Image (cartoon, rainbow, N blue to C red):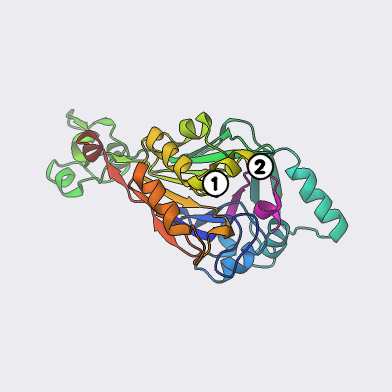
Amino acid sequence: MQLTFLGTSSGIPTRSRNVSSIALRLPQRAEVWLFDCGEGTQHQILRSDIRISQITRIFVTHMHGDHIYGLMGLLASCGLAGNPSRIDIYGPPKLDDYLRACGRYSQTHFSYPVKVHTVTPGILYEDDEFVVSCEALTHRVPAFGYRVAEKDRAGRFNVDRATALGIPSGPLYGKLKRGEWVTLPDGRQINGADLCGPTEIGRKFVYCTDTIYCDNAVTLAQDADVLVHEATFSHHDAEMAYQRLHSTSTMAAQVALSAQVQQLVMTHFSPRYAPGNAVDLGDLLAEARAIFPNTVMAHDFMVHDIPRRLREAIASR
């Protein structure tokens, strides 16, 4: 799992930061899942290593323009960039109406299936590898945070040891790799778990924006490997954050601390903190690290790998 930050500004783009979008790359299945799609996102994709033709799912947090104005253009381009078999879009109420209106007035017709799913808190999607869920956040319009949880999988299978035990290759190996018990032709019973390394813990990525500090964000982020959380304002501007229902750097850090995440990545920064101003982004980072030290600040085109953790490593913490 790998994150590519395509836009890290709030509200409006700047010379160095576009508006909101993050790509989650899933190399094991040659897929990209996109989170938010502000204006200009497809141009950002063209400047990155992301392939538009690999986008299969798009998750929209809310209906404000800096999170959706690039969506219709991207969808139109997807049909010209490799004819995807299908794109599933998840988002708040009215997202489907918005896309249908855009298509009607621009006379845009997709050459591939597009399915819009209106989200409600809980599980949105599940397959053999992943579970995606969401929770309602606290903003001026209906907004949702998303959690992508990779399922645990058995550790590396020791083929040499299986061979030494005289286990014939074939269907039995599949069961043993899954940690199941098997009975050999000679009557011996073998526990697959004994032939596998430590369980690989599924990775967890959580994306929360736009929102003020809220309990649902903590619930969603619980034990995440990476929490990407908005930090629109400095703690010095907390009153403005409360008025506009956005987070400060310290609120983002408090969510990370309460949820016991591994790492916090802050994004969605107000342009008011440009270099040379009385308060700049370095101050926001210092504010957050005073509460949650393992914090970094996202920038456009930053690539962040989410590493695997082993069961033994978890137990030793």
Q: Which residues, given as a range, are shown in magenta? A: 56-69
Q: Position of residue 54 (x, y in %)?
A: 56, 60
Magenta segment: does it hold 59?
A: yes
Callout 1: few (<14), some (14-19), or many (20+) C-alpha neighbours within 10 Å? few
Relative to residue 105, is residue 254 drawn left or right?
left
Instruction: Say what secondary structure mark 2 lies in.
Output: strand
Q: Which kind of residue does numbered mark 2 sit on?
A: Gly
**Which of labels 1 and 2 is toward the front?**
1
What is the number of the mark on residue 54? Answer: none
Residue at 20% over, 48% down: 159
Between 257 and 160, the residue placed more toward the observer is: 257
Q: Position of residue 218 (x, y in %)?
A: 46, 33
Callout 2: few (<14), some (14-19), or many (20+) C-alpha neighbours within 10 Å? many
Q: Does residue 53 lie above or below 184 as drawn?
A: below
Q: Which quadrant is home to the C terminus? A: top left
Relative to residue 232, is residue 92 drawn left or right?
right
Residues under labels 1 and 2: Cα distance?
30 Å
Between 253 and 63, the residue placed more toward the observer is: 253
Residue at 16% over, 49% down: 160
Q: Which residue is mark 1?
A: 237
Q: Which kind of residue does numbered mark 1 sit on?
A: Asp
- Quarter of the image where one finds residue 91: top right
Q: Position of residue 179 (x, y in %)?
A: 28, 34
**Taking the image as drawn, is residue 292 in sight?**
no
Label pair 1/2, CB-CB below 8 angstroms: no
Between 226 and 114, the residue placed more toward the observer is: 226
Q: Position of residue 305 (x, y in %)?
A: 38, 56
Q: How many numbered markers are drawn?
A: 2
Between 81 and 60, the residue placed more toward the observer is: 60
Q: Which residue is mark 2?
A: 91
Instruction: Say what secondary structure mark 1 lies in.
Output: helix
- Quarter of the image where one finds residue 123: top right
